[in-house]
Amino acid sequence: MDAPSRPAMPAPRDLPSVDRVLATPAGQQAVEAFGRAPATQAIRAALDEVRACLLAGKLVAVPAPDHVALAATETLERDARAHVRPVFNLTGTVLHTNLGRALLAEEAVEAATAAMRSAVALEYDLATGTRGERDDHVRELLIELTGAEDATVVNNNAAAVLLVLNTLGLGREAIVSRGELIEIGGAFRMPDIMARAGVKLVEVGTTNRTHPRDYAGALNDATGLVLKVHTSNYRIEGFTREVSARELADIAHAKGVPLVNDLGSGTLFDLARLGLAHEPTVREAVAEEADLVTFSGDKLLGGPQTGFIVGRADLIAAINRNPMKRALRVDKIRLAALEATLRLYRDPDRLAARLPTLRLLARTRADIAARAHELAEPLAAALGEDFDIEIVDCVSQIGSGALPLETLPSAGFAIRPAAEASGGRLNALAAALRALPVPVIGRIAEGALILDLRCLEDEQGFHDSLAHVGGPG
Ligand SMILES: *Cc1c(COP(=O)(O)O)cnc(C)c1O
């Protein structure tokens, strides 16, 4: 029989059944890997897609059952990739809030993993066999490292600020300089937090200048606290006047009112040791006689997301009695990681090597540039002739509002489209890098995709990842 010169257009009725696709070797593998229900669902979706293409006249043949199974498997594999998964942070921002901030030290990772796998003596005193306090695991360390009388830990620094305001200021007034009414990002604005904490905000001074007399004039019987906020993410320069924490402590204490200093990032380590500008340490803030100091666990401190309140024992006791504390507490996994992180601070000489945040901040441009030279060729080979790659000086940032004007000399790549520039090509490349099994996140500036290598420690992993550029997907 002679085949007709033109086959009849394929029709949906020619499609294989779901069962037939499931029975193919690829279908069976999909069932094995993902389970019968997800595999069936993916095959059904793949068949629906083929049916739509057939009806639209976009297909000249009905795909074989194993092809449908393979298409379904691809979908299943894509869906199975975790959403919260590692990426290469080549943005040049070491503490990138959108990329999860601090990387934990190995010691912290091990402690957290162990705590995940087993029961831990979280609120249990092993010496006496009676109930213990969950904060006690890090309390002594925090006291030792900050010089404060007492300490407590909550979910993050935003929670620490909220809890302090609510404990000291519910139904009362909190005095804050207009120059410090910050928004940290997202919905965390100091005036809004005050309102939610049930505290009446009393603004004093002006945006650029606040004087001791402004605070003194606002203090009255209804004052619950004076709040000083470390101005994160920006700096007011020029004709300015700020009242130091030390001066402010005297002013507040003369009226018997506590001073709270929200340090934001805060650090337990003098960054000047790394050649950076001096960021006030928590110990200094405590020594300046703030009654309470709040700071973050996953910014410069380099630990898990947590917030700390350190200071006067009677105020910490009041905070621990506040029912909100229970809603803001930290789980065992983070407490374990935190304890391990804080222990590293007992040995400051080796801290910068063991704590990733400080290690990354300490890297020199020369060191980073040397890595760039090693990776330039593989990168050029992976991107092909469509892109020009240049090794360039970069300027990294600490991020998360710490030392906002401090920049770190770094190195990396500037990637530009080779032919007549088209921004679309660059965006497509950035998207392709984000679609890699381990996504690469850079930033686009001045017609180039910039990859700052400061935070790249796994060069082999990056090198291996390049093999997937231009691959499927
Ligand atoms: C970052 C920051 C906070 C919030 O800390 P999180 O740990 O992110 O909740 C609060 N106050 C200041 C001044 C900050 O910089």
Image (cartoon, rainbow, N blue to C red):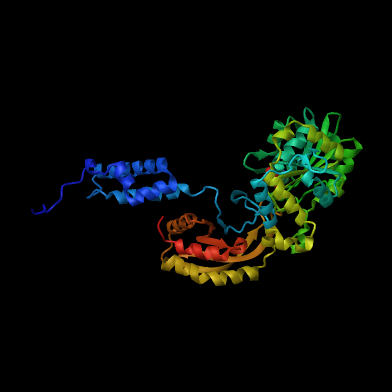
Between 149 and 444, the one nearer to me in the picture: 149
Q: Is residue 341 left or right of residue 439?
A: right
Q: Nearer the viewer, residue 322 or 299?
A: 322
Camera-side residue: 20 or 362? 20
Quadrant assignment for ligand 1: top right
In this view, the residue farthest toward the left is 1
Identify the residue at image location x=64%, y=70%.
367
Q: Quadrant of residue 428?
A: bottom left
Residue in the image at 67% along x and 67% along y:
364
On screen, residue 252 versus residue 374, left or right, reads: right
Residue occupying image coordinates x 71% and y 54%: 403
Q: Is residue 276 left or right of residue 415?
A: right
The quarter of the displayed image where residue 278 is located: bottom right
Q: Nearer the viewer, residue 204 or 141?
A: 141
Residue 300 higher or lower than 318, as above or below:
below
In the current view of this chain or complex, which residue is farthest to the top?
A: 171
Whether residue 20 is visible, yes or no, is yes
Q: Give the left or right position of residue 427, taking residue 335 as reference.
A: left
Quadrant, the C terminus: bottom left
User: Residue 297, position in %: x, y?
Assistant: 71, 48
Q: How many marks?
A: 0
Who's the residue at 57% across and 68% down the image?
392
Q: Which quadrant of the figure has residue 188? A: top right
**Most extreme residue toward the right, as rendered?**
254
Residue 131, how many percent across, how many down?
Answer: 78, 36
* Residue 174 appears in the figure: no
**Position in image of residue 204 (x %, y %):** 78, 38
